[in-house]
Amino acid sequence: MKVAAILPAAGLGTRMGKYSGAESAGTSRKQFMLLEGAPILIHTTRKFVAAKSVSEIIVAVRREDIVPLERQIAEERYSKPVRLVEGGRNRQESVGNALTQASAQTELFAVHDAVRPFVTVAQIEETIRKASEVGAAILGIPPVDTIKLADKAVIQSTLPRERTVLAQTPQVFRAALLRDAFACAARDSFIGTDEASLVEYLGESVHVVLGSDRNIKITRPGDMALARLFYQEEVGHLSEARTASG
C-alpha cells in the first residue's frame, strides 16, 4: 500500500513569538527553531522516514524556504523521497497543495503537524493500519481537565469527558476520501480546524487511535524546555536499546 505523509510547514508561528533558539534572529517560525542542533521540522521528518509503511514525504513550506530546506534535506540523506511543495495561506491550502502533487497511486495520506516531533514510529504505523481498515483514523488522547463550553468567557455547559478527545496527528485517510473532503470543503467555502473536521463535514466517520501526552505540538516558548527533555529521554532510550541488542 502506497502511503504519502504530508507535513504542512508554511505557518508563521504567531503564537510562539520571538525566541532565541530560532533558526535566525527575530524569527518566530516554530518549525525552523533548533532542537539540539536541528530544526524541529527535520526531527519530525525523520520519524516518517523511519516508518516502513510510509512511501514518501511531502512537506508544504513557504516559497522562500524551499531552496534552503532542500539543502538541509540533501544533507540528511534520507532513505526515501522527501519532496517540497509551496504551501498556502493556511493549513488547509497547504495540505490541499500537497494533495495535488502526490502520486496518483497513493492509497493513504497521513497528515502530521510539522511541530510534533515526538510522535513514535509505532503510533504512525498503528494509525496507518487503522485507517487502511476503516478509511479514516487519527491519534487522540482523553482529556484530563474538565472541558467547558463557553461564549465570550461565560460558561454555557460542561462537556462530559468520556465523550471528548483531544485530537493529535497523524491523521490518516484513504486517498479518495480525503480528496473528496477537500473538494466538498472548497465547494462550500468551509474551513476546518484539521483534516478530520473536513471528513466529518463530509458526513464520514473518523476513528480514534490512542495517542500519547508526549506527542506534544510545540506552539509556545515554554514548550521548548519540555521538548529538550523529551529529546534527551528519546536519545537515551535509543542508546539503551542499541546496547541491549549489541
Image (cartoon, rainbow, N blue to C red):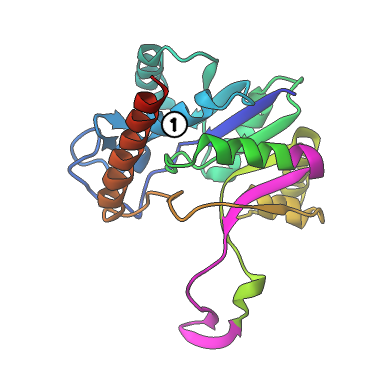
**Residue 158, horizontal then vertical, whole percent:** 58, 84
**Residue 219, horizontal then vertical, whole percent:** 37, 52
Mark 1 highlights which residue? 62
**Residue 185, horizontal then vertical, whole percent:** 73, 49
- Residue lying at 36% horizontally and 36% vertically, measured from the top left: 237
Q: Looking at the image, is 33 positioned above or below residue 45? A: below
Question: Quarter holding the C terminus?
Answer: top left
The residue range painted magenta reads 131-158
Circle 1: element type: loop
- Residue lying at 50% horizontally and 13% vertically, measured from the top left: 79
Q: Amino acid at mark 1?
A: Arg
Between residue 11 and residue 171, name the one nearer to us.
Answer: 171
Taking the magenta stretch, the answer to whether it contains residue 196 is no
Question: On the rendered structure, is 219 left or right of 158?
Answer: left
Few, some or many C-alpha atoms within 10 Å of disc 1 (few <14, some 14-19, many ≥20)? Answer: some
Taking the magenta stretch, the answer to whether it contains residue 157 is yes
Question: On the rendered structure, is 15 left or right of 180?
Answer: left
Q: Looking at the image, is 139 positioned above or below residue 70? A: below
Total marks shown come to: 1
